[in-house]
Amino acid sequence: MKDHVFAMVQPGGCFLCSSPGFFMEVFEMNKSWLIVLVGAFFEVFWVIGLKHADNLLEWAGTLVAITASFYALIAASKNLPVGTVYAVFVGLGTAGTVFSGIVFFGEPFSLIKIVLIFILLAGIIGLRIVENEKSNGEADS
């Protein structure tokens, strides 16, 4: 705690802490998590496209979604741990695909399926929390 002096106390520090680079690190990390969310969003589209694409335009859209999702995955992995990024990416994509299948494509609703998806999402949130604690711990030392 003694190493972290708020900007109001120490001139030249960022608003959140004494290290001027801290704000940029947090911004880059949060931007990277947003990129993971965008990638998972596109993942849902390409998985649906693999099942439902019937013509050239739909297949082209599927290929664009594949490219966008993997580009986002690679971009986010440059600033975040690749294992955590991949787990969050796949977990959110899986949850989104299951929910879209139920809502838009008439796949059967199953309470156990929904419960398991929520357990998956809880695991993703847990990974995100652990990652935040780990990066905060590294900033403290």
Image (cartoon, rainbow, N blue to C red):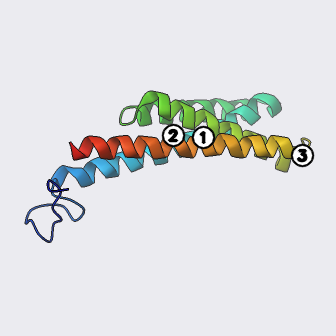
Query: Marks 2 and 3, Cα distance to the nearest angstrom?
Result: 27 Å
Q: Quadrant of the C terminus?
A: top left
- Residue 29, placed above or below residue 85: below
Categorize mark 3 by other alpha carbons within 10 Å: few (<14), some (14-19), many (20+). few
Residue 86 in the image: state x and y as whole percent.
Answer: 53, 30
Q: Residue at x 80, y 30 (%)?
A: 51
Precedes in sequence: disc 1 or disc 3: 3
Q: Is residue 96 visible?
A: no
Residue at mark 1: 123
Amino acid bearing label 1: Gly
Query: Left or right: where does residue 36 sit relative to residue 109?
Result: left
Callout 2–callout 1 Cβ contact below 8 Å? yes
Precedes in sequence: disc 2 or disc 3: 3
Q: State the SS at label 3.
A: loop
Q: Residue at x 11, y 69 (%)?
A: 9
Categorize mark 1 by other alpha carbons within 10 Å: few (<14), some (14-19), many (20+). some
- Seen from the viewer's position, the closer of residues 130 and 108 is 130
Callout 1–callout 3 Cβ contact below 8 Å? no
Q: Is residue 114 visible?
A: yes
Query: Left or right: where does residue 6 sit relative to residue 47?
Result: left
- Seen from the viewer's position, the closer of residues 132 and 70 is 132
Residue 121 in the image: state x and y as whole percent.
Answer: 64, 44
Residue at mark 2: 127
- Residue 37, placed above or below residue 90: below
Amino acid bearing label 2: Leu
Amino acid bearing label 3: Phe
Comparing labels 1 and 3, the label whose residue is closer to the camera: 1
Query: Marks 1 and 3, Cα distance to the nearest angstrom?
Result: 22 Å
Q: Quadrant of residue 40?
A: top right
Residue at mark 3: 109
Q: State the SS at label 2.
A: helix
Query: Marks 2 and 1, Cα distance to the nearest angstrom?
Result: 6 Å
